[in-house]
Image (cartoon, coloured by chain):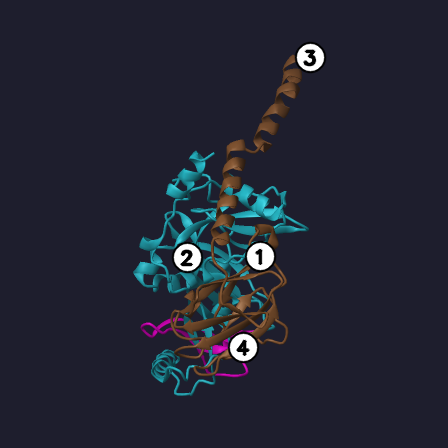
């Protein structure tokens, strides 16, 4: 039996397999540039609200169908006071994925009766602010961004 | 450098607030009245609703506390986008309606769907529920790409062929507003996810879907266990990570064949040092 073709196949086959597994270095480089650029985008936002007696106080207005400000930025480790007011119809409020002790996310915020939330910004990251109470057609588009900026970004107060 | 965990949700389509139960419509009594009337007409009832639920811009007008019995109303024009009647579920009996017969029943509902929706829907699959009923799904495609969350589903009782319910997504984003060509490849999207979460690679071919107006790559990575990451295919930002937040058509495999069209943002990065 002629084993030469089989021998050649055994020699050549691994190179085909390995080439399929290798990642394109250009893809890796572009991906890194994209990650860095997207991170930079959030570093440019100024801190929100003002410091009152050691607490960063931020007023957030809820309208059909947006929050103002739409981006909220705080520093990690700060004590935060959010004052969320409904400016037209009843709204709800949640920073999705961020647990605030003692706060029920189905709390209804009515016009003239703002919600006050106090917590410590413990975890660095970016979250979405959403409305949790049906406020009309367009409710699903109502969102904002909540950023807790870490010291690693060199943006501490 | 500390790992910055990006839990950014660029578009709210996957916020849990898209399903809300027992909503209060007192802030808009006119809307409450018109959608109630629409539901009563469709279900041929004069009963007063006992509850309203919210389902991705549709309002479920409910009439029975003990079982699900409701009509889904689109509040923009009060048209009906579905209904459900759990009293039609037959339990404890053998299945008499064949798969082909169920497909025929589902197809009748599909054929009655408005043309603008029908032309974007494709048959997906049938699956059996824990109740013993069968759900047939038709998924929305634009330029050969699945639009996340948009589908028609029909639930059929396999004992007597009753349609227990059906639901059509309202296609909130018109196809003309969608960008379907990605600016980055699935491989780049996968690398973005791996770098962002400092994760391990998993053997999974990135899939392209449309979320909202934009194409997104769905990739899989492994931290302690495999997780999905939705990467915006236009700017590489992360929409979400974790469990898959949509029902994917069975055997869906779209990605490599869709031409990549780099935009200005990506071109600038490609050309930068």
Q: Residues within 10 Å of mark 1 (few under 14, many from 20)?
A: some
Q: Secondary structure at mark 4?
A: strand
| Image vertical order of residue A73 relative to residue B28, above or below | above
Q: What residue is drawn where x is 47% and y is 53%?
A: A44
Label 2 and label 1 in one chain: no
In the image, residue B143 lies at what x, y percent? 37, 47
Disc nearer the start of the sequence (1/4): 4
Residue bearing the label numbered 4: A116
In the rendered view, tell whether residue B94 sits above or below residue B67.
Answer: above
Q: Nearer the viewer, mark 1 or mark 4?
A: 1
Read off the chain for label 1. Answer: A
Region of the chain picked out in magenta, as a range: B61-90
| Callout 2 and callout 4 share a chain | no
Residue B205, can we see it?
Answer: no
Q: Quadrant of the C terminus of chain A?
A: bottom right
Q: Which residue is mark 2?
A: B212
Closer to us: B209 or B248: B209
**Any mark on residue A156, and which?**
1
| Residue B202 picture location, percent across and down | 62, 43
Q: Which residue is mark 3?
A: A1
A55 relative to B154 in the view: left or right = right
Q: Is residue A100 above or below residue B40?
A: above
**Viewer-side label of 3, 1:** 1
Mark 2–mark 1 Cα distance, whole angstroms, equals 35 Å
Quarter of the image with the N terminus of chain A is top right
Same chain shared by disc 3 and disc 4: yes
Chain identity for the colour cyan used in the image: B
Q: Secondary structure at mark 3?
A: loop
* Chain drawn in brown: A
Quarter location, residue B61:
bottom left
Q: Residues within 10 Å of mark 4 (few under 14, many from 20)?
A: some
């Amino acid at each position: 039996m002629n084993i030469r073709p089989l021998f050649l196949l055994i020699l050549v086959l691994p190179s085909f397999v390995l080439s399929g597994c290798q990642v394109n270095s250009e893809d890796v480089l572009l991906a890194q540039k994209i990650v860095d650029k997207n991170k930079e985008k959030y570093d440019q936002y100024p801190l929100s609200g003002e410091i009152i007696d050691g607490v960063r106080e931020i007023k957030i207005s809820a309208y059909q169908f947006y929050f103002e400000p739409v981006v909220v930025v705080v520093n990690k480790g700060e004590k935060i006071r959010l004052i969320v007011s409904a400016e037209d119809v009843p709204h709800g409020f949640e920073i999705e994925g961020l647990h605030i002790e003692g706060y029920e996310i189905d709390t209804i915020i009515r016009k003239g009766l703002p919600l006050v939330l106090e917590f410590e910004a413990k975890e660095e990251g970016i979250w979405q602010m959403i409305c949790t109470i049906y406020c009309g057609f367009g409710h699903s588009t109502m969102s904002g961004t909540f950023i807790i900026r870490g010291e690693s970004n060199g943006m501490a107060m | 450098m500390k790992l910055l965990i990006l839990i950014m949700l660029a578009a709210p389509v996957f916020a849990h607030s898209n399903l809300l139960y027992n909503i209060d419509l007192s802030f808009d009594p006119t809307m409450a009245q018109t959608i109630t009337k629409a539901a009563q007409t469709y279900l041929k009832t004069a009963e007063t609703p006992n509850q309203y639920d919210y389902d991705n811009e549709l309002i479920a007008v409910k009439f029975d506390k003990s079982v699900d019995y409701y009509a889904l109303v689109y509040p923009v024009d009060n048209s009906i986008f579905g209904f459900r009647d759990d009293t039609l579920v037959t339990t404890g009996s053998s299945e008499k309606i064949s798969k082909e017969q169920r497909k025929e029943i589902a197809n009748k509902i599909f054929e009655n769907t408005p043309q603008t929706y029908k032309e974007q829907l494709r048959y997906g699959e049938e699956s059996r529920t824990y109740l013993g009923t069968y759900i047939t799904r038709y998924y929305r495609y634009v330029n050969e790409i699945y639009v996340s969350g948009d589908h028609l589903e029909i639930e059929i009782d396999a004992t007597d062929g009753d349609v227990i319910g059906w639901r059509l997504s309202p296609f909130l984003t018109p196809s003309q507003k969608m960008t379907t060509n990605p600016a980055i490849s699935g491989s780049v999207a996968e690398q973005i996810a791996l770098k962002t979460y400092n994760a391990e690679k998993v053997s999974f071919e990135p899939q392209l879907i449309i979320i909202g107006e934009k194409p997104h790559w769905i990739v899989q990575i492994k931290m302690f266990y495999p997780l999905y990451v939705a990467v915006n295919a236009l700017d590489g930002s992360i929409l979400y990570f974790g469990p898959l937040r949509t029902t994917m058509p069975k055997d869906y495999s779209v990605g490599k064949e869709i031409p990549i069209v780099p935009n200005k943002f990506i071109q600038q990065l490609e050309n930068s040092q």
